[in-house]
Structures are given as C-alpha cells and as structure tokens.
Image (cartoon, rainbow, N blue to C red):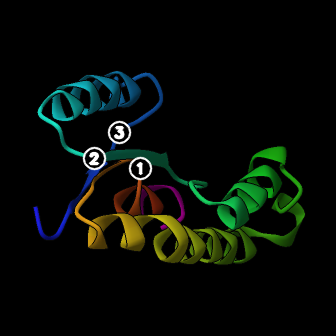
C-alpha cells in the first residue's frame, strides 16, 4: 500500500468504539498491514498533555471557547506527529473519535 488510510470511530461513551477498533486492528494486522490505533484527545505526546488538562477540568473555568481551542491544539499536534506520518508510510490509522465528536461536544 503506497499510501495509508485514516478511519475514525465516532459515538458516545459505551457505544463499542474501542471494541470495534481492537477487532478491526487485529484483522488488518492479520493481513500484514501496519496499523496505528490512536485516540482523541491525545495520540501524541503534546496532545496527551492537553488531554490531561481537558479531562482534569482545569480548563472549564475559562469557558467553552478555551476548551475548543485546546481540542484544536491537541488535534493539530496529533495529526502532525502521529496521523500524517503513519498515513504517509502506508499505515492504516484507526482513531477513537475525531472531528465529528468535536462538532457534537464543542459545537
């Protein structure tokens, strides 16, 4: 595979996203493909640091605008440090949440 593919899994808590990601990752790896399993917020060192701030509630006093900016910063780092390089080298990237979740939760 010259160029990889990026697949996101969206849904609420307990919907089965993680279960489906693990199942698909195992099946794809069984065919010899490189698979990167990642998540949002997080997925890269910088994005994981922002995830900690977001999930701790430390950003809540600054309002939803600040929270949206933090999610955007985490996503930028995640894409540049993890997703884009993996797709460029031909990997299949499976991501637990991405842009659709931002539209729902921060929209």
* Residue 105 is inside the magenta segment: yes
Instruction: Compare residues 98 and 102 and report the one nearer the observer.
Output: 98
* Residue 10 is inside the magenta segment: no
Q: In the rendered structure, which disc, 1 or 2, sits on the residue that comes first in sequence?
A: 2
Callout 1 touching callout 2 (CB < 8 Å): no
- Numbered disc in front, either 3 or 1: 1
Residue 42 x/y as whole percent:
61, 54
Q: Find numbered disc 1 in the image and state the secondary structure of the residue it sits on.
A: loop
Callout 2 touching callout 3 (CB < 8 Å): no
Question: Circle 2 sits on which residue?
Answer: 34
Image quadrant in which the N terminus is located? bottom left
Q: In the rendered structure, which disc, 2 or 3, sits on the residue that comes first in sequence?
A: 3
The residue drawn where x is 74% and y is 75% is: 66
- 26 left or right, relative to 71: left
Q: Find numbered disc 3 in the image and state the secondary structure of the residue it sits on.
A: loop
Query: What is the quadrant of residue 74 in the picture?
Result: bottom right
Residue 44 x/y as whole percent:
61, 60
Residue 61 x/y as whole percent:
89, 63
The residue drawn where x is 18% and y is 35% is: 28
Label at residue 97? 1
Query: What is the quadrant of residue 43 in the picture?
Result: bottom right
Question: What secondary structure predominates along the stretch shown in magenta?
Answer: helix
The residue drawn where x is 27% and y is 33% is: 25
**Magenta part of the protein: which range?**
103-107
Judge whether 84 appears above or below 32 on screen: below
Residue most toward the front? Answer: 32
- Numbered disc in front, either 1 or 2: 2
The residue drawn where x is 42% and y is 57% is: 104
Question: Circle 3 sits on which residue?
Answer: 11
Q: CA distance from mark 3 to mark 1?
A: 8 Å
- Numbered disc in front, either 2 or 3: 2
């Amino acid at each position: 595979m010259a160029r990889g593919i990026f697949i996101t899994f969206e849904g609420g808590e307990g919907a089965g996203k993680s279960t489906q990601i693990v199942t698909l990752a195992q099946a794809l790896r069984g065919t010899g493909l490189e698979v990167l399993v990642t998540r949002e917020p997080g997925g890269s060192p910088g994005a994981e640091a922002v995830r900690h701030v977001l999930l701790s509630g430390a950003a809540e006093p600054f309002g939803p605008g600040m929270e949206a900016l933090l999610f955007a910063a985490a996503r930028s780092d995640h894409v540049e440090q993890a997703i884009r390089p993996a797709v460029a080298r031909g990997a299949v990237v499976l991501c637990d949440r991405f842009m659709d979740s931002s539209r729902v939760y921060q929209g």
